[in-house]
Amino acid sequence: MSGQLTVPMPDRKALDITALRLEFPALGREVNGHGLVYLDSAATSQKPRRVIESLTRFYERHNANPHRGVHTLAEEATAAYEGARARVAAFVNAPAPEALVFTRNTTEALNLVAFSWAEANLRAGDEILVTGLEHHSNLLPWQRAAERSGAVLRVLPVEDSGALALDELEELVGGHTRLIAFSGMSNVLGTIVDPAPLVAAARQVGAVTVMDGAQSVPHLRTDFQALGVDFLAFSGHKMLGPTGVGALVARPELLEAMPPFLLGGGMVLDVGEQSAKWIEAPWKFEAGTPAVAEAVALGEAVAFIENLGWDRIQAHEESLVRYALDSFARMDGLRLLGPTEPERRGAVFSFELLDRAGGIVHPHDVAGYLDQLGVAIRAGHHCAKPLVRRFGAVALCRASFYLYNTEAEVDLLIEALQQTRKFFTGA
């Protein structure tokens, strides 16, 4: 995929998964008398020890409010916070550190664009295009933006294979299109989306593009400038970092032109009784005391990933995807959704467990039984109800893998699913 996927280098040493897993304290615990098999990284990833320790270290030695004091701790906090901004910005090849706004998560980053850019630029009759793959966080803000502006929300459909119906782009994108929002990877189907045709379609009509990178940034080498998108949102907690911190990366000229989303301390140049002037981006979007320790810890998570090496990470995950697809295909009574070609999907697998009559074992029952066996998966609509309904379901089971998972854990999942099916159906 242009600007995002890279070919693993054959001369690099493979990841030492045994040693790597020792870096993650949670992976060593037992659940219900079984060793934990954690397969819910699409919801949130586990954290390596260095990330956890960085939070403690900040609070023990450098805890202060950044940008607001001249004492030593305040200056240390400022340096640590801005150092983390520079590190995370470089991680996704942002044009400059100032092109990255720290947010709470992907959801807040997308809402920032929907309230700040959209409210300043959308008018009645304009059109917003989203895809049928979207998480609610990349759908609901655009529904609200359409309601408030009078714009029309249009949807690019999803094919039965889980791919986008790109042949309909020409019909859906036209002179009234102002914004195209899409996910880099589906959190339900695992579909990897090539941004190139969406970006090209937007550029032809002068529209801006917003990419939800919550699932793609943790798993695929991401180059913001090569992708050509205008906005990129992602979360720290899905990429080995802590909860409570994420980022919005944008073209600097767009950030400079956008009004702030939240108002309060730290984002003003001057304030009078009737008006105020904002400081420059990105700080005008970071009202109030930011999540300083969390931002610093996200910088540690980025360093951890970079030290492992993207080529090795992606080679490992691609191998896991192939192994999991083969394993699911050999299991009776399981309906797997999404692309069947390993190169077209990430390590996110949503499925239904079937009984002997072709009925469905409720995903919550499946997840609950698996938990008794120490296997952690997700069950529900995965904050993507329109997409789940598109495939005729109300809820789905979802197993999602990350760089610390193994083929042995795929085997344990399949064994546990077989046991679960037998328990509920006798099959």
Image (cartoon, rainbow, N blue to C red):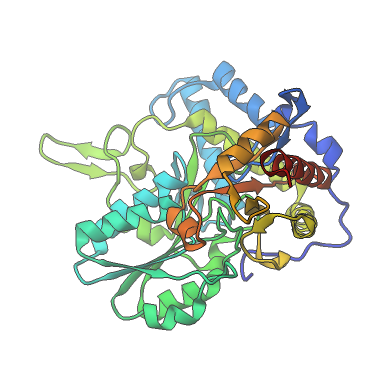
Report the front residue among 296 and 129.
129
- From where the camera sits, is residue 43 visible? no
Q: Nearer the viewer, residue 116 or 408?
A: 408
- Up the image or down, 189 lies above or below 344; here it is above
The residue at 61%/58% (across/down) is 190
Is residue 102 shown left or right of residue 224?
left
**Residue 231 makes an appearance in the image:** yes
Check the image and report above or below for 200 versus 229. below
Asked whether, in this view, residue 136 is left or right of residue 96, the answer is: left
Q: Residue at x 62, y 71 (%)?
A: 2
Residue 338 image offset from top left, x and y in percent: 61, 62
**Tag count in the figure?**
0
Q: What x and y, as percent, mark residue 18? A: 85, 37
Pick out the residue farthest to the top: 60
- Residue at the farthest left position: 274
Residue 68 higher or lower than 234, as above or below = above
> Horizontally, is 285 left or right of 42 in the view?
left
Q: Position of residue 156 (x, y in %)?
A: 43, 71
User: Residue 25 is drawn in which quadrant?
Assistant: top right
Q: Quadrant of residue 364?
A: top right
In the rendered view of the protein, which quadrant contains the N terminus?
bottom right
Instruction: Write the residue at 28% across / 54% down.
Output: 144
**Residue 188 drawn at (x, y percent):** 56, 54
